[in-house]
Every structure is written in structure tokens, then in C-alpha cells.
Amino acid sequence: MERKNAWAKYDAAGMEKIEAFARNYCAFLDNGKTERECVAQAVKAAQDAGFIDLMQAAKEGRQLTAGDKVYVNWMNKSFMCFVVGREPLEMGMNILGAHIDSPRLDVKQNPLYEESELAYLDTHYYGGIKKYQWVAQPLALHGVFCKKDGSTVTVAIGEDAADPVFYITDLLIHLAQEQMTKTAAKVIEGEELNLLIGGKPVQDEDKASVTAGVLAILKEKYGVEEEDFLSAELEIVPAGKARDVGFDRSLIAAYGHDDRVCAYPSMQAVLDFEGVPAYTVCAVLTDKEEIGSVGATGMDSRFFENVVAEFADLAGAKGDLALRRVLKNSRMLSSDVSAGFDPNFAAAFEKKNAAFLGRGVCFNKYTGSRGKSGSNDANAEYIAQLRRILDDAEVAFQTCELGRVDLGGGGTIAYMCAKYGMNVIDAGVAVLSMHAPYEIISKVDLYEAYLGYCAFLRDARPL
Ligand code: MN
Ligand code: MN
């Protein structure tokens, strides 16, 4: 049952392939710190790879045949792409699904205020975070202001070396005697996550005001007024780029590995698909996973089903029963990160069933908490097929659980896709410090995930 370390498989030429893939992935991360930025990159990559807009094809009543490539931009926050296969669509698709939202701080709708001649934006955190990890470090502001005239102003401030950054303060250690006795959950509380955005008063009518100065800059540089915050989506993320970690540069520290480390290779596996697949292949990059896959761009909405319905109608599976068959007969990898075994916190794991960095694709048969509650629990028959596919392709994989029984837990999009009756399992990459501002992955696991996803798209078949 021993799983080998995947690095051992590679010679110098193989290592260069791992490096090249990792470099492209880091560029995707650096340019994709929000779900919107990830979708913009995915749309461009799809167009460059010759994919056409599915909704446009639907409008034109264009029929799709084997080898045709289409994509969908769903509300600028979720993305899907397909390559039509040779076999009838009703025999199901090979689907890769991952999410492109990550834990962060969102700016409130009425955020701007001034206190003691400093200006702030008030925030509401998004997803599961340790709040104390977000203070005392440079932060960047990414997002959109949607204006009443229908125009959108896109901002990404704090990434360029010439940009200013933003900051949330912590209490100095000299005065922290009381703070240091609090539990970690209370050391920094949600309403203390206030983003420092200015400190220079300017004369505004009869008084000097820092917020007036900030608003003047917003007006001048971006053409937005204070009221435009009402229809803005602004996300505060760590400032800075993905970096190699370690003397051997085998690891990557970056914001948002969860779950872009699965989303990027999933998307790339479909975009890179050469020739005509036996069964239609599909990638879905979805939003809102970190807050329960809710909303019109999350996996629990019917956007996925609606897009497949549009696609099926053009690809020869017309009508409701045909659509149900397409979904029921599909195979899916719900690609999400797994908790990597951390020697610093060994007691949180059960070592025989933990994910290890460097050992390749992580299959989580089930997630959930308190007795697998809320989990998908994939079928053994399906896992057997996946073992064969990955072994035949010589892709390193491991099976794992999210930590020790009854210590905590978590969920993914797997159970929502399982509602259609399809076979689905969680298959992702091991991460250290998951949900921290900077998370760690191994480059070889990223590459094994890509190779594993390619093999799955090529070789998975109806059970
Ligand atoms: Mn995730
Ligand atoms: Mn997560």
C-alpha cells in the first residue's frame, strides 16, 4: 500500500516539463486573484485554442459535431468548455470540475469611513479564514465597480511594484497582554478587519478630511464616486506574486492554490486535448464553492445543468430525457485540494490515509464531517476504473481523507454533481496551510494532476 514519491519518476527533461507547467500556472495565479480574473483568462485561453462561444452558436442554431470545441462565460464568474466526442452524447461526458473562488475579504457595500485622520474600508470576510492571518501584511484590492450607466470599471491595485498597497493593523506586542490571552478565534474579530486606505487630510469645503482626499483620487484615477461602492465587488487579497519555495524550488507559495491548482490543470487538459475524444470532454470552473456553492454562479445553482442543456441541444441529445441521460451517464472528477500531511501538526492526521506532498493526485472517496455527513462517498466500481486509467498512464496517485476522524471536515462540489446520478469523486492536489493567505503545493503534484486529468478525459468510459 506504500505510495511512491512522484519526483523519482522524472529525468532532467521531465523536470523541465514540470517547471514549464509550473511557470504557466504561476502566471495564471498572478493574473487570477479573483474568480472574475480567472474567467477572463480562461475565455482568452479558450479563444486562442480555437474554442467558440456556445451561447453564440446556440443563437445561430449551429449544430455541433465530433471535434467541435465550445466554451461558455457564465456571468464573468464561472466558465465551462467542451470538446465534442465521437460517441453519442447520451453515453455521458468526462467532466473535470473545480472552483476558482478563494477565501478573502470582501469590501462592504457602504465601506468608507474616517477615524482619527485615517481612512478605512470596512470588510466582510468570504469563506473560512483564520482572521488573525490577514493583518500586518501588504494587501491588494481587486474587483469591479459597476456604474449606473452600464459601464464597468475594473481595478487591480497593489500588484504592480509602482502601486500602493493596503493594510490591516494588528495591536503592538507591547500592549497586547490582554489580546494574547484570547483564543485564536477572537484575537482578531470580523469587525476589526478594516482596511487602511489613506492618511492625508485634504481641505473639503470647511473642514479637512482624509476620505475626501481618497474620493478625489478614486474620481480622478478610476472615474468612480462613493455611491458606486453600492454596486461594486471588491476583493482584498494578499499583494504579491506566487513564489518558489525551498533551496530545491520544488514547492510554490501562493494565494489561491485552493482551488486554482486544480482549476488550471482541469481547464488546460480540455484546452490541450488533441484530436477527437471518444466521449465528450468538459471542464467546469465554478464560483462560490467557499461559501457553499450558492448563488447563480455556484455549483448548487442550475447554471451547470442549463449550460449542458444548451450544449446537448446542439450536440444531438435533444429533449429532457436525453439531457438526463447525458448527466446520469457522465463521469466526473470533482477536482479540489486535499489537506497535505503536515509534520508540524501530525496529530491532526491519520497517517495511513493522509495526503502527502509529492505523491501525486489525491483521491478523496468521501469528505464531510462527523461520520461522512454531507459527503459524496464515491462508488468503488468507479474508483476501480480510475485506478486502472492512472496506472496505465503511469500517473502517481494516492487515496486520502481530510484529517483525523471527528477533528473537523469540509465539503466540495462533488455531492451536487452526484445529484444527477453521475459517478463523481474528489481528485485534487495536496496543500499545506490551506486557506491561509499564502498556501503551499508541490510542483510535481500539479503536473501529476494535469497528466491524470488528461488520462481521465481520454480514457474514462461508461460503467
Ligand atoms: Mn476548495
Ligand atoms: Mn477551500
Image (spheres, rainbow, N blue to C red):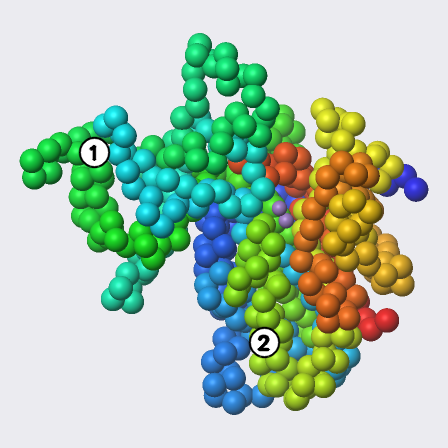
- Residue 6 falls in image quadrant: top right
Total marks placed: 2
Q: Quadrant of the N terminus?
A: top right
Answer yes or no: disc 2 within 8 Å of ligand 1: no
| CB within 8 Å, label 2 to label 1 | no
Look at 77% across and 27% down and name the residue there. 346
Look at 74% across and 65% down and name the residue there. 418
Task: From the viewer's perspective, tell me whether residue 449 is left or right of residue 298.
Answer: right
- Residue 191 falls in image quadrant: top left
Residue type at mark 2 is Asn
User: Mark 2 to mark 1: distance in Å?
Assistant: 48 Å
The answer to whether residue 243 is visible is: no
Please tell me whether mark 1 sits on a helix, a strand or a loop.
helix
Q: List the residue tagged with mark 1.
A: 210
Task: From the viewer's perspective, tell me whether residue 445 is left or right of residue 190.
Answer: right
State the image coordinates of residue 391 (x, y, percent, origin top left): 86, 54
Task: From the viewer's perspective, tell me whether residue 284 is left or right of residue 415.
Answer: left
Residue type at mark 1 is Val
Please tell me whether mark 2 sits on a helix, a strand or a loop.
helix
Residues packed near mark 2 inside 10 Å, few (<14), some (14 to 19) or many (20 plus): few
Look at 25% across and 53% down and name the residue there. 227
Q: List the residue tagged with mark 2.
A: 306
